[in-house]
Image: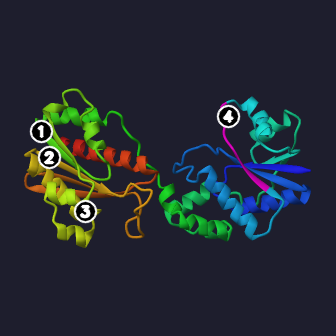
Amino acid sequence: MKGLFIGRFQPFHKGHLEAVRQILEECDSMIIGIGSAQEERTSANPLSGGERISMIKKVLESRDINPVEVYPIPDLNCHPAWPYYVEAILPRFEKVYGNSEVVLHLFDSIGHETGIIDQVERNKLSGTEIRKRIREGREWEDLVPEEVAEYLGDIDMKHRVEPKIDIDSESEKKASHLLTKKDKTISVAESCTGGLIANRLTAVPGSSNYFKAGFVTYSNEAKIDLLDVDKKVIEEKGAVSPEVARQMADGVRKNRGTDIGLSSTGIAGPGGGSEEKPVGTVHLGLSTEGKTETRSFHFSGDRDDVKEQTSEKALRWIIEHLKD
């Protein structure tokens, strides 16, 4: 008999490993189905379908657990049809195992034998609890197989489970309203955001009244030549630093003669990060006559997520500044 064990495995933990062993005591072979395999990564779903397959295979192979096959199972937005869809995309199986009564009921309704997994310490051995512990910096490694702990360390799981900020589609309008009301002009110098802040600031009709210029200074040479950033500061502190963000904001404001200068510099990923400055590290600068400030952030998500969150924080800072 072949069994099917479906789960999200975010991540694969010791409870899952024990379930696999239980199933193989009853079945000659089994399939592990990776649920929601098509989902993009989020802080609640930090591992892609492919990553979960790789993670589980590492555990099975290192412990010589077989015969076990691992397959992705995308979601289908129609519960009654979903078990038929699973049957169509997977090799033949007879019995379905899991902890979800809804899932087991769906397969039971189309004639499959089902079985509840008797999982111990479910309050600790759950993906939600493990992600929470990783996010909070608490001990979690003993809750997962050592192969999983190593895998999650290699991909910087802590960075992935940090929640992203919500993007407010009204931020552009709020910033535009306040810039117009206070009769202020602004120019921006962007690196990691690649013009996204300027794009959002000019998305509102009438933006030419307050928005004067945007520089995308991606290279160090551009920062030095166009914004008068000190080459020695870049060499000593790095282009991704509060010091460079400060000089970028100050430089663009003076260059264009605006009331406000705003800057962004960071590492959007997927490459370019380091232990000291991981992917998602961002510094913003805001310059006005007589005062230049910086703010530092560490964002989660993919490249687009980092850029969007950076632009959102930049707009919120403008709004906050103009409300004072």
The residue that disc 3 covers is 242
Label 3: few (<14), some (14–19) or many (≥20) C-alpha neighbours in 10 Å: many
| Res 76 label | 4
Residue 26 % position (x, y)? 91, 56
> Disc 4 vs disc 1: which is toward the camera?
4
Dot 4 or dot 1, earlier in sequence: 4
Position of residue 296 relative to residue 102, above or below, is: below
Label 1: few (<14), some (14–19) or many (≥20) C-alpha neighbours in 10 Å: some
Mark 4–mark 2 distance (CA, rounded to whole Å): 49 Å
The residue that disc 1 covers is 184
Q: Do the residues labelled 4 and 1 touch (CB within 8 Å)?
A: no
The amino acid type, in three-letter code, at marker 3 is Pro
Residue 189 % position (x, y)? 21, 50
Residue 127 is at least partly visible in this image: no
Position of residue 262 relative to residue 231, above or below, is: above
Q: What residue is shown at x 37% (from left), y 66% (from top)? A: 277
Mark 4–mark 3 distance (CA, rounded to whole Å): 46 Å
Mark 4–mark 1 distance (CA, rounded to whole Å): 50 Å
Q: Nearer the viewer, residue 36 or 122?
A: 36
Dot 1 or dot 2, earlier in sequence: 1
Mark 2–mark 3 distance (CA, rounded to whole Å): 17 Å
Q: Do the residues labelled 4 and 3 touch (CB within 8 Å)?
A: no
The residue that disc 2 covers is 260
